[in-house]
Amino acid sequence: MTDTPISERITPSDEILRDDGTIDSTGLLDEVSLYNLYDERDSPEQDAERILEITYPTDTLSTIIRNTARNLNGDSDFSEGGQIVGGGYGSGKSHIELVIYHLFNSPELGQAWVDQQGIDAEIPAETRTAALQMFNLEKDYNRLSEAVGDYLGIDEWVGGTDLPTVHQIRDTLDGEPALVLLDEFERWYGMMERDEYQDDNLAFLQNLLEAAGREDTRLSVFVSLLYENEDVQAITQRTNPFTHDLGSRRDEKIEFILHRLIGEVTDAEGVSSLAKEYTDVYRQNDQIELEDYHDMENRIERYYPFHPLTLELLMEKYSEQRTSSDARGLLRFLTEILSDNYTEVDLILTGNVDVHKYTDRFQYIDNELVGKYINDYNRLQKSDGSFDEFIEELINITLLHSLARAGEEGANKREMLMGVMRKGINAHRIIQTFTEDVYGHAWHIHRINGEYAFDVDENPAARIEKKAEDIHKHDAIHRTESLIREDLFNGRNNVYILDPVNTEQNIPDNKTFKIVVSLAAKQNYDDVFEELTTGQNREFSNTLVLVTPEKLAGIDSNTGIRQLARKVVAGEQLKREEEVLPEGFEEIHDQNYQNLRDRVRDKFGTVHTSTERGLFPETLPIGPGVDFYDATVSVVKPDPSQLRSEVKNAVKGEGASGIQYEHLRNDFYRETAHATLTEESELEEAIKSLCQDGVLKVGGYFEERVRSLGNDTNLVHEQYISDDDDEDEEEETNTITVDTSGRDTTGGSETTTSGGTTTGTGTLSGGEATTSETAFNCPQCGDELENTSCECGFEFDASDVVEGKVSVEGATVDELLDEFGIEEPEGPKIRPHPIMGTIDADNKPDLIDQVERETQGWDIHEATITIEGVLTSDDLSEYGINADALDERVSLDETFEITPDEPLDHSSFLALLWDLNVPEKASLSVEMQVDKNE
């Protein structure tokens, strides 16, 4: 209950206020009929004082009164006596005609009322009046002329068969004022039994209207229309009468309704303050974004105690009804809503309308849709009949917006928020409740063009939701595990789940790099790693790394993730089991999968690498489109300089005898004190680099590139290499020869061997070929080379050929390179970063932090920086625009293409980013062409 309810700011009108202070609609005159004016029994319509008391002088009614008074007074400057009042059922046509009747039939009372309302009109002292509700006349008339004559007391029009002409109408009235009100004429005119009188009746109606337009005739004629008959419409427009369309006068109808319900505003200042409070709440929420907050504040004050959106929505939905009694019942319904909320709330929002209590009223609009609403209402209701916070209000709002246009129109987020939100209520909580606890749980609520609407068809999301209730939590967790392996880690076969459910798993004890992913969150993972390694007597312990959720954000215990996974499993089962699925099923199932993927992705993460002091945690650098496997490798991959240092120290520690490559490699895979290798090539490159730099002697290689590295290759530290070894070592040049023996279809070949060089004859290319096929022989074993390496251990690459370490007998360098498909190395290797997409951030510091972590040691050859944002008034001043009115109304979209003459190093590029002028509210993205200096 609010601190200051409606009851402390207004009093109800006398029409609905009972003696005990309660509000009751039983005495409400919510429907009037002109035929009751002539009833022998008393009726409310006959009480002129009561009718005028409940009437609000709208602009339309005031205009009608002034026009009628001038015409009946014979104003020489005014002779327009015909007036058409149009509108649908319940629009107030009959009420206006009843008011006009009483004003001119009771002139003293009528004059006092118009004076009280400030209407400039003089009521004639005596007017002949006739109010005809054509469907309920005292007699069964076939001619309009006969009915009008009878009600006006003109006998010659009643008995005669000839139609009164315009002149006869003038002469009969003889200068005396007369008022004729015709209600429901269209329906009476169109009755089948009057087919033969239709021409006569249209003709007399035209004569009446033409007479009303003459200066010498003091006649005023009113005709109310539903606009259902084209013939009647055409006749009424021939004399160009005043036309009043009540269907377009919503504000006037609201004024009339509030006049009927509200007696007095006892705390106008409090109402004004409340309107400002609500408007301030809307201003502070970026999901509402009204075009005119000042207008909303004024309307809340004018429409009090109803919120403008509530009152306008109910009026719109009631206007969809086609039966007059129910359309007019809006006034009674609003009285009941006011009674329900009078002492409970400070303002009646859409969510305060107890739809379930009044379903009988809405069934007239769409009975089938209301039935579906009742089913979902009962489904979401708890066993004790209550609802969790906001749920009942949200499904009520959704139904009200869906009525009359089921499946086509519904409530958007703004309408949901404004239907529930008050000061102190969190908007995010409202939307979260709807998306997580209503949508998908209510079987008949659909999402349509950004709105949520009830429909008679079942929502496929709810179909999935229903199926998900039967999915065991272990199946949901197992599906999450599969998603992690197959999607996030791209199905790599060396990725494992720690303690998976529903699965027997054996993590092999071999030298392959392996990632073990934990769904559970712990303070410390050392005991987990110990159980995986020493606890299982694993030999190669340094091949494992752990990837875990960030901090304590566990995945397996997260209720939201488990529920999403249940939906994914349910959708997959339905696809297998059902031949026909509801329209939109695939879209919703795919969205559920993406939501699960995003939620799981957001939980990661941390990479834990083993060290001699235990596990060392590092942040997993993930972002849009990033493969988790690649991201993990980027963290674990050993730093080349650190790896060189570890290899050097390990070999040095073995003394003069050195260590075979196989044993050194096994040590790295076994001992967690060493860097963790993601590929064996990392160790090989470190050894080859140390050899070229003269730090290690690798087999017979020293201070040169290692051409072959076998398991038994011995590694010795430079400290233990004698000078004699250096002096005796000679540079050996290998010569690859062209051999045509056994392949020549036209002749033979000759081969000789001298020392370490093999020679041969034959032509590879150019000139006249003497062989049909040519082979290249290995300089070490003489076998035919199939590619750039031989089983004996000999291998070469482009740099060996270019630098002359490998020569070729019988072919040029270019021919050799071309034959084996290898390219001569040229300059730096420039590549895009990221490979796909861009580096994105919501602010400059976050962008710089990410770029700094990803590009250390790199050179940036090109870069594209994109900035998108909304400029505040402070931002605009940087551009020389000083206009507070444009605050957050100007958008920015800038792209900087950076192509320096010389590549920027890591620090220079970061300095450039720091110097960029970026708006306070902006998103940034960067893509680059880089040289990683590998």
Image (tube, helix red, strand yellow):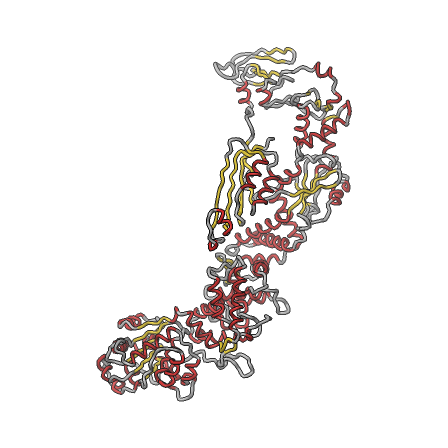
Residue at 73% in and 16% down: 723
Front one among 573 and 58: 58
Q: Looking at the figure, which quarter contains the C terminus?
A: top right
Q: Residue lying farthest left?
A: 167
Q: In the depicted view, which residue is nearer to us: 33 or 767?
A: 33
Residue in front for this viewpoint, 461 or 61: 61
Q: Measured from the top left, where is residue 735 in percent x and y?
A: 60, 16
* Residue at image coords 29%, 73%: 241
Image quarter in which the N terminus is found: bottom right
Apparent side of residue 174 relative to residue 322 in the rendered image (left or right): left
Query: Vertically, is 718 above or below 475?
Result: above
Percent across and percent down for residue 559 are: 65, 55
Residue drawn at x 67%, y 41% is 515
Q: Position of residue 395 (x, y in %)?
A: 55, 64
Quadrant of the image occupied by residue 316: bottom left
Residue 68 lies in quadrant: bottom left
Above/below status of 94 relative to 693: below
Q: Is residue 380 above or below residue 603?
A: below
